[in-house]
Image: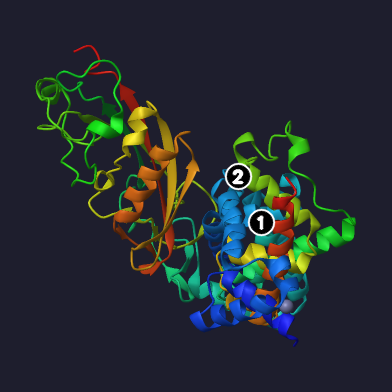
Amino acid sequence: MEQVYLAAGGAAIAQARVDTLVREYQTKLVRYVRRMVGDADTALDISQDVFLAAYRTLQADPERPLTAGWLYKTATNNSISHLRRKKIVRMLPLDRDHETYAWRIDERSAASVDLQTAMNKLPSDQASAIMLTTYAGYSSQEAAAILGTTSDAVRQRVCRAMRTLRSVMSDH
Amino acid sequence: MTACNQAEVLAGAIALGEATDAERQTYRGHVATCSACLRANGGEHEIERTMARVGQARDGETWDPDLTALVREKMNGRKRLLRAGLTVAGACIAISLAFNLAMVAGLGRIAPSFADPLVLNYDGQRIVLEHRSTAALPQATAAPRMVVEHNVVTLTRQPAAVGAVGPRAPQATIPSVQQAPRTVASTASTLAAAQKTFDDTPIWRRGSGGGGGSIAVTQTTTSVSQTIPRLDRQTDSIVVAPAYTIRAPEPIGGETALTPQPAPIAYAQNASGTSVFEVQIDERGVPTKCAITKSSGFLSLDDAVCRAAMKARYSPKLVNGRPVPGSYTDAFTFRSSGNGEGL
Ligand SMILES: [Zn+2]
């Protein structure tokens, strides 16, 4: 009986902590994932899975510290495996204007379209490097810790991603 | 690593604003002699210009879906699974007579009943079993209220300067708007004063008295009552609730501490609308970043709102009394009223 109560208490703690994580990071996370996969519905699914994974982890150990970095790391891995599994390229933002969650009119600025067009062309290691730094606001060193690489590698990937964006910008 | 690979790393550092002067120097040195790298990456300014494009895209994002309910639903689905699993586990445990005897003895000591239930609490460090009497519970207090205040700022147009004919260039007659914000007061008394005064005071001002223009501030306050789990004598269940206290960040001095002062261009544009902003507050209460989550449609108004939000100081978010980074959201509605037009 005691174990049952303790397990139920652990679940409640885990749930409260995940609630807090959701409130704090959901906006940043869904925007990051949407840029990664190029599609709003997929971004919603993946983000929910990330928080659910956090819940599973916390259920096993309610005291375990979970940082934003953990959320981004899981989101990055899930996005990459989604792109790989579906063997799809990221969708273009402009041809989906009728959808509720897709890119809204006020988000379809020239800058936004340029960025997404570039994102669609990038290999996922470059895409995650430029997004974690510019969108999520991590330094190259922090992004390197999330991606399991060195900060020099992150900087190099950012440079290559930037090159692609530059060529997209000069296309028009 | 070849020199060109090294140049990529340096270009990345420049792109992220992390490069030291020495690193910039090295990059300049490389592209001065390597046309391939110069063509591919561009010079320092080119890199920074390209990266600014990413910043524009990021700042233009407005998508803000709410996953709270969806995630909670999925968690509850998992909890039911867990409970089912625990039931099976419980059946296995029941086989052990010795364990059962021990449990009976243990429960006999704790002996929860509806009048005297067993409560589990999480105090941020560990789980404690409390022996608490329902009778000893304080009178059911009102649930904590979350107050959402909405600022409505009305911008009043300053009467035209004496002798001015027709529409005038706003910049010409508007001096600095970077003055200390004045106290917020009701407009009724200030309107007359505003109409009398024909001086060079700024037209966009939140406040009253003395100046030509006036800005009325009304605040509509809505209360949202939050339901908190409470022990209820009528329910025949034992409540398991985590004690997790969270206090949201607030501007020091209240909402009125934020005083957006739109630039003169707002006047020229006849700007109006509602800017909703979110400002990130670090654990010291210092704002680190401001984003417009819903634009008023006027850069000048949005800009003023974010500048005001970044200027204020906040009390940090507290989780179980510990300061942590958090965010603060509010809205300002600007209305450009035509006062002074017909004078
Ligand atoms: Zn080179």
Q: Which picture quadrant has residue A99?
A: top right
Q: Is residue B212 visible?
A: yes
Label 2 belongs to which residue? B65
Asked if both marks, 2 and 1, belong to the same chain, the answer given is yes
**Left or right of residue A109, residue A86 in this image:** right
Foreground residue among A60 and A4: A60
Q: Which picture quadrant has residue B106?
A: bottom right
Indicate the position of residue B306 as horizontal and vertical percent values: 39, 48
Depicted B115 relative to depicted A96: above or below:
below
Say which residue appears at 19% left-offset and 21% top-offset.
Answer: B159
Outermost residue on the top side: it is: B342
Q: Is mark 1 within 8 Å of ligand 1?
A: no
Q: Is residue A56 visible?
A: no
Indicate the position of residue B123 as horizontal and vertical percent values: 43, 70
Foreground residue among B258 and B284: B258
**Left or right of residue B300, residue A143 in this image:** right
Q: Are marks 2 and 1 in contact (CB under 8 Å)?
A: no
Locate ligand 1 by image quadrant.
bottom right
Which quarter shows the N terminus of chain B?
Answer: bottom right
Foreground residue among B94 and B227: B227
**How many circles with numbers are drawn on the protein?**
2
